[in-house]
Amino acid sequence: MTPTSILNNKVAIVTGGAKGLGLTLTESLLAEGMQVAICGREAAALEKEGRQLIADYPNQLFWQACDVSQAEEVDAFIDAVKRRFNSIDVLINNSGFGKQTLVWETSETDWNDVMDTNVKGPFLLARKVVPVMIAQQSGYIVNIASQAALNGYANAGVYCASKFAMVGLAKALQEEVRQYNIHVHSLNPALIQSHRGSDEAIDEGLVQNEDIASTLLFLLKQPRRLKIDNIGMWGF
Ligand SMILES: NC(=O)c1ccc[n+]([C@@H]2O[C@H](COP(=O)([O-])OP(=O)(O)OC[C@H]3O[C@@H](n4cnc5c(N)ncnc54)[C@H](OP(=O)(O)O)[C@@H]3O)[C@@H](O)[C@H]2O)c1
């Protein structure tokens, strides 16, 4: 018999949890017995993946459309998660994207869109989720940042700026919530090979979604006294 995971019955939120890396993270957390709430902007994608997942994990999954850059939608989503699962133990800030443009050719709209999702989103979520974790005196907030949070890359100015800001926000938040036994982590993967749903062969030189998922589970299973942060991940 498989031993029960220490994460069994804990509640996690995965933003962008119905696509790409987020979907792999959602599956991994469900397989640990966690109750998982996912969101994204595209309701149809949530509905499609959600229906498939609850067939394997009945009563463990909740989904609701939510644009993380919109305060009212974030507030409504978190209120719904609280009603459904009563607590929030883990928040994974996974929603995010970039624009491949030179800094001086980036439009104001693209700048705002990227910053609003990658930076304002985690801020709006923290406003709603941290008070729940403070009441519980425990919690984990994990940002899916990037190597672009630590290095500059050409054609990725707004993405780099947003991921640097995401990690800066996380570091400040960590100082504020340490006293409440809340951990704030950032994972910094290099380019991930996203071959979900395709026959593409695995490129062993690139990080895979599953590598991020196994690292996330490792983090969540460490003793509370241990602080691990800014884990860099590259293909080898
Ligand atoms: N792929 C890489 O090589 C790589 C490397 C390092 C870090 N990362 C980071 O990993 C995370 C996931 O990336 P991915 O490769 O899985 O990308 P992806 O397949 O494009 O998935 C992005 C997810 O974010 C959601 N999303 C985007 N804007 C949103 C918004 N305003 N509100 C709510 N959800 C939103 C999307 O759902 P909707 O479209 O339905 O909103 C989707 O679920 C991102 O933060 C990315 O920066 C990726």
Image (tube, rainbow, N blue to C red):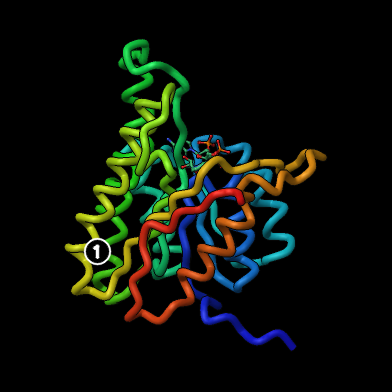
Relative to 13, say whether 22 is above or below: above
Q: Does residue 189 appear to the left or right of 235 in the view shown? A: left
- Tell me what residue is drawn at x 25 percent, y 53 percent: 127
- Tell me residue 218's x, y (percent): 52, 70
Q: Place residue 83 in its image quadrant.
A: bottom left
- Tell me residue 8's x, y (percent): 55, 78
Relative to 102, say whether 149 is above or below: below
Can residue 190 be seen in the rendering of this structure? yes
* In front of the other: 55 or 178: 178
- Tell me what residue is drawn at x 32 percent, y 62 percent: 184
Amino acid type at image mark 1: Pro
Relative to 107, say whether 68 is above or below: below
* In front of the other: 147 or 186: 147
- Tell me what residue is drawn at x 61 percent, y 51 percent: 236
Where does label 1 land, which residue?
Answer: 131
- Tell me what residue is drawn at x 34 percent, y 18 percent: 103
